[in-house]
């Protein structure tokens, strides 16, 4: 491989990175990652880092999952690609659909539509929601409701329901008719309380109010993450999702669970919906479905929607939507192997146990570091919110956040920063010792920042 300076220079000259300013690439060049093994990654200088980010919330099984690598190479040799558009299908795709229906049966899911990633999954679910209402003779149900601070990918539909201005402003106008409810964010909210239950009650009331104001017959679906990830790991009170589900049911509104991060065990439950005891109408997945080894996703579909499409034999019941890579045989084979390994290694149980240890450790850090304003987490998705001042909650500056990042890096752990948040989403295979390593590195990073 070319040397580090050459790569950095050419990266700055020729690459546009997602979620980054192109002009920053020389002043603040990205780290070049050259390897991965177990729960660790290796940078171009050969430094080994425990990956506190898990790729991008997706490498649940770590970097050395031979069963998945084997499934990919075997499938590549057998059938590297064929279309799943009407007329042809393939074995791995069928086997995976059966496995997902079984696996997500407790969530009410009966069918799957395959995609190339999370944004595709969200776009698919939004489009199918509108189509469902047209099939049902309610074509005016076109609006979508979502939560502020929610993240639903970057296609126009997904960006429209996103609850973060950073991903919206430059791309407006977005879809008309999107309604944003408050985030279930106990640390900062407009409700003058930090009680998660009261906040959940207030959001449920907001939803009822928006339904009354807009008219239930104009609303297609509510889309939400069971635990908000990219928005800063915001864990709602257990009553929020069930309360919103009840209002959806009363008003003929579909519930789309965006489980791109939460499906497959990250919260300690097999799905985020199951964590809160809710059956959504559709479940968007991607990321860990293939452990990050292959771009792939699935929208799982509940029986109400599946039955309506099946019953409509007109053109309206036909799915006028799909991707070249929908049902990619290599992706499907990878996903099947991931599912098998996730079950075999019982990763959700490990995520729950390690998550408790991590959260306890983060709370200890908060007691020692005044720049930690808030600690949040569920399973192996956790966040520290850094502040300049705990009393008035002024967010910590970029320099402070950067020092924490660098300090943790120097101590051998990769963490992710997002605004004034430190996000932790390690692989789900980490051990108790790995949790201690993350906490020690964070401690070092935090010390270096004050
Ligand atoms: N939905 C959620 C909840 C996500 O976290 C993400 C990505 O982080 C997406 C959708 C978009 O997925 P992708 O980046 O694979 O398009």
Image: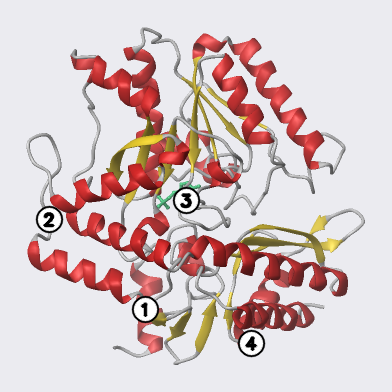
Query: Which label lies toward us, 3 or 4?
Result: 3
Rounded to the nearest angstrom, the CA distance separating label 2 from label 1 is 24 Å
Residue at numbered disc 1: 64
- Which residue position is annotated with label 4? 411
Where is mark 2, residue-wise? 81
Can the viewer see residue 298 in this picture?
no
x 68%, y 70%: residue: 358
Q: Secondary structure at mark 3?
A: loop
Of marks 2 and 3, which one's residue comes earlier in the chain? 2
C-alpha distance separating marks 4 and 2:
43 Å
Asked where in the image residue 77 lies, by quadrant, the reply is: bottom left
N-term-proximal mark, 1 vs 4? 1
Would residue 344 be visible to someone looking at this image? Answer: yes
Given contact means CB atoms under 8 Å apart, are the residues at marks 1 and 4 in contact?
A: no
| Tag 3 residue | 263
Could you say where residue 254 lies in the image, as x and y percent from the top left?
48, 24
In this rendering, would 127 be left or right of 259? left
| Residue at mark 3 to residue at mark 4: CA–CA distance | 31 Å
Q: Earlier in the sequence, mark 2 or mark 1?
A: 1
Determine the residue positioned at 57% across, 47% down: 166
Discs 4/2, front: 2
Q: Is residue 118 above or below residue 314?
A: below
Does label 4 or label 2 sit earlier along the sequence?
Answer: 2
Whether residue 29 is situated above or below residue 58 in the rendered picture: below
| Residue 76 tag number | none
Task: Say whether residue 262 is left or right of residue 113.
Answer: right
Which quadrant would the C terminus be assigned to in this image?
bottom right
The percent position of residue 9, horizontal first and vertical second, equals 39, 79
């Amino acid at each position: 491989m070319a040397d580090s300076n050459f790569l950095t220079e050419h990266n700055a000259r020729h690459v546009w990175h997602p979620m980054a300013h192109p002009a920053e690439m020389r002043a603040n060049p990205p780290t070049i990652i050259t390897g991965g093994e177990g729960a660790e990654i290796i940078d171009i200088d050969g430094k080994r880092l425990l990956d506190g980010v898990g790729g991008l919330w997706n490498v649940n099984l770590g970097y050395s999952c031979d069963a998945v690598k084997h499934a990919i190479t075997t499938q590549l040799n057998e059938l590297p690609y064929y279309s799943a558009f009407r007329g042809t299908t393939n074995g791995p795709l069928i086997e995976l659909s059966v496995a997902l229906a079984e696996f997500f049966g407790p969530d009410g899911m009966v069918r799957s539509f395959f995609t190339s990633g999370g944004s595709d999954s969200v776009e698919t679910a939004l489009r199918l929601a509108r189509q469902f209402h047209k099939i049902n003779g309610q074509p005016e149900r076109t609006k979508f409701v979502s939560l502020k601070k929610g993240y639903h990918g970057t296609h126009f539909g997904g960006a429209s329901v996103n609850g973060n201005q950073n991903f919206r402003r430059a791309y407006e106008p977005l879809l008309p008719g999107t309604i944003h409810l408050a985030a279930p964010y106990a640390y900062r909210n407009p409700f003058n309380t930090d009680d998660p239950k009261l906040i959940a009650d207030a959001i449920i009331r907001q939803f009822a109010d928006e339904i009354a104001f807009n008219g239930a017959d104009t609303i297609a679906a509510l889309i939400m993450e069971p635990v908000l990830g990219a928005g800063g790991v915001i864990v709602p009170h257990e009553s929020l999702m069930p309360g919103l589900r009840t209002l959806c049911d009363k008003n003929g509104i579909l519930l789309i669970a965006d489980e791109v991060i939460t499906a497959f065990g990250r919260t300690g439950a097999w799905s985020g919906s199951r964590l809160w005891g809710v059956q959504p109408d559709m479940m968007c997945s991607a990321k860990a479905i293939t452990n990050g080894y292959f771009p792939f996703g699935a929208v799982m579909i509940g029986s109400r929607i599946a039955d309506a499409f099946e019953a409509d034999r007109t053109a309206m019941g036909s799915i006028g939507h799909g991707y070249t890579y929908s049902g990619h045989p290599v992706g499907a084979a990878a996903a099947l192997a991931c599912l098998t390994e996730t079950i075999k290694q019982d990763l959700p149980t490990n995520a729950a146990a390690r998550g408790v240890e991590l959260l306890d450790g983060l709370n200890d850090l908060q007691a020692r570091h005044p720049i930690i304003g808030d600690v949040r987490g569920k399973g192996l998705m956790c966040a520290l919110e850094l502040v300049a001042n705990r009393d008035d909650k002024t967010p910590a500056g970029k320099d402070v956040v950067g020092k924490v990042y660098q300090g943790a890096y120097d101590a051998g752990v990769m963490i992710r920063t997002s605004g004034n948040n430190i996000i932790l989403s390690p692989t789900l295979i980490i051990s108790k010792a790995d949790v201690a390593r993350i906490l020690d590195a964070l401690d070092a990073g935090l010390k270096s920042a004050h």
